[in-house]
Amino acid sequence: LTPADVKYHAGPSPLANVPMVDSRNPKAPPMTQAEFDVARKIYFERCAGCHGVLRKGATGKPLTPDLTTAKGTDYLKVFIAYGSPAGMPNWQTSGELSEQEVDVMARYIQHEPPTPPEFSLADMKATWKVIVPPEARPKKKENAYNVDNIFSTTLRDTGEVALIDGDTKQIINIVKTGYAVHISRTSASGRYLYVIGRDAKINMIDLWMAKPDNVAEIRVGLEARSVDTSKFKGFEDKLAIAGSYWPPQFTIMKGDTLEPLKIVSTRGNTVDKQEYHPEPRVASIVASHYKPEFVVNVKETGKTLLVDYRDVDALKITEIGTARFLHDGGLDSSHRYFMVAANQSNKIAAVDLKEGKLARLIDVGKIPHPGRGANFVHPQFGPVWSTGHLGDDTISLIGTDPVKHRAQAFKVVATLKGQGGGSLFLKSHPKSQHLYVDTPLNPDPAVAQSVAVFDVKALDKGYTVLPIAQWAGLSDDGAKRVVQPEFNKAGDEVWFSVWSAKDKQSALVVVDDKTLKLKAVIKDPRLITPTGHFNVNNTQHDIY
Ligand code: DHE
């Protein structure tokens, strides 16, 4: 290059005259490097989940220096120490942070947020391991298990899943997975199980092995929550997809080896104010049964992406504006509509996967949290999909049949009153007459340790309370939160986790769906912090 060429390519940027925030933020109170490092660690351990890595806000308020420096250290200290009625925890008065820690946090959030590194294809490949290559795997099932009725139970704090035989209730294997492991999903054939940890590590387990175990693993980022696999006819088990919180992106992989093929960033503009957001995290992902598409829900921008995976090198993405802070959701009983909670907007978005458009945004209670939701047939309004709420004691039933129950379609047709707020998951099954609603985050231990059961044919009769934690018969004084109902394949029993702290005993409790009586308690020293559980058949076919 001649000097003239260089000048041509490197001309003066107009950005030189644009005002920018000084990344050192001289307006913020000073901090030593040691204080900054302590605060950064605390921020990522306690605060980032709600306020975001770049502090743009989600469940919590934005905490960027333009806002925080105006408030000042003293104000921020009070806020962090005492919390707020809007949901900010009282970090100091609860004893979780010391006065000194609160002081460093108040100063830290007035500085620019440090940005974590990106995670490229090369980074992913460096973590990718094919433990048993496809050609060395069993040609047919090499065990006597009824694979369809295996449960994969999250052992949250040990970074493992327990594979449990749903017929005999025996543990088949405890498989090492990612850190603070989150969810399991089944491939279209039901042979493979994909498990994702919060550290974005995916483990792929082959259920045909004599003792089912890991056959491949990869990390797709630095933090993640969701994974699924292609389910459309002709693409069964072909592709896997995982969404990450950081970097904000999703990754498509080969279904049999987890080889990463394509990374797509989710950075972009929000649905409402159409402002740029640097950190739109990927929340739930589901594979469409209607089209060769993945449904990817982007939290901070409030967009649902329908990713047509037929040609990974020429992805066609339909971007549907839904509502901000998308979180979890599931399919309706026909599998045509994806119902996703926009939790801080108090809405459910019903996305029509056949037409590729929004069917409706539906106002529900405070902070809907359905898991995958629960489908059943309402005696009056026909097929409904339902959600419980974190912020109130209601359960919203939404009509999902626009053909035979048009007037009720995508409207709240009834609101049930449950045991209380703090509900995370609810479940039913086509063969069951019951709707089970958990409340593990309710402050009243009696409520957190039991579940409400509604008879879907007599909803006006209210609910029956099942004392699940009491039935577990645990000797010590653990928190014993009862979490996530999940049916077996036959749809005649329901499993619950009784989730205690890492150093306390936990258990799984199995209830007979017909009689609502205790059927079995599964206890084992290896069952440490069980939370979610995923029945192979029901997850494979999206039956819930
Ligand atoms: Fe989850 C699903 C995110 C805390 C148990 N959780 C999901 C999904 C998301 C998510 C985006 C949907 C995945 C999908 O369908 O593809 N969860 C988050 C968080 O950001 C949050 C609030 C905080 C965090 O730090 O992770 C969080 N989740 C929890 C828990 O504390 C739970 C109760 C216990 C645990 O194991 O960590 C928990 N989340 C679950 C479970 C599901 C889930 C069991 C799957 C439900 C299902 O039926 O599919």
Image (tube, rainbow, N blue to C red):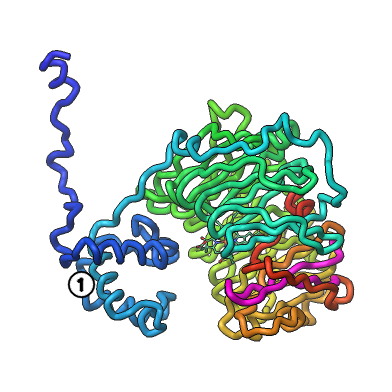
Q: Can residue 127 be seen in this view?
A: yes
Residue 470 drawn at (x, y percent): 73, 83
Q: Nearer the viewer, residue 207 or 330?
A: 207
Report the residue at 79% width, 51% height from top.
Answer: 537
Q: Is residue 267 above or below residue 89?
A: above
Taking the magenta stretch, the answer to whether it contains residue 511 is yes
* Pick the front one: 373 or 160: 160
**Residue under numbered circle 1:** 72
Confirm whether the magenta stretch covers residue 390.
Answer: no
Residue 172 drawn at (x, y percent): 77, 56
The residue sitting at 70% across, 59% down in the picture is 162
Question: Element type at marker 1?
Answer: loop
Residue 238, given in percent of the width and then of the height, sits at 68, 34
Question: Front-most of 195 and 131?
Answer: 131
Q: Position of residue 416 (x, y in %)?
A: 69, 75
Q: Which amino acid does label 1 sit on?
A: Gly
Q: Which residue is drawn at 77% across and 41% down?
A: 189
Q: Is 214 displayed left or right of 142 in the figure? A: left
Q: Is residue 3 left or right of residue 392?
A: left
Q: Give the range drawn in magenta.
A: 491-512
- Image quadrant assignment for residue 504: bottom right
Pick the quarter of the image with the C terminus. bottom right
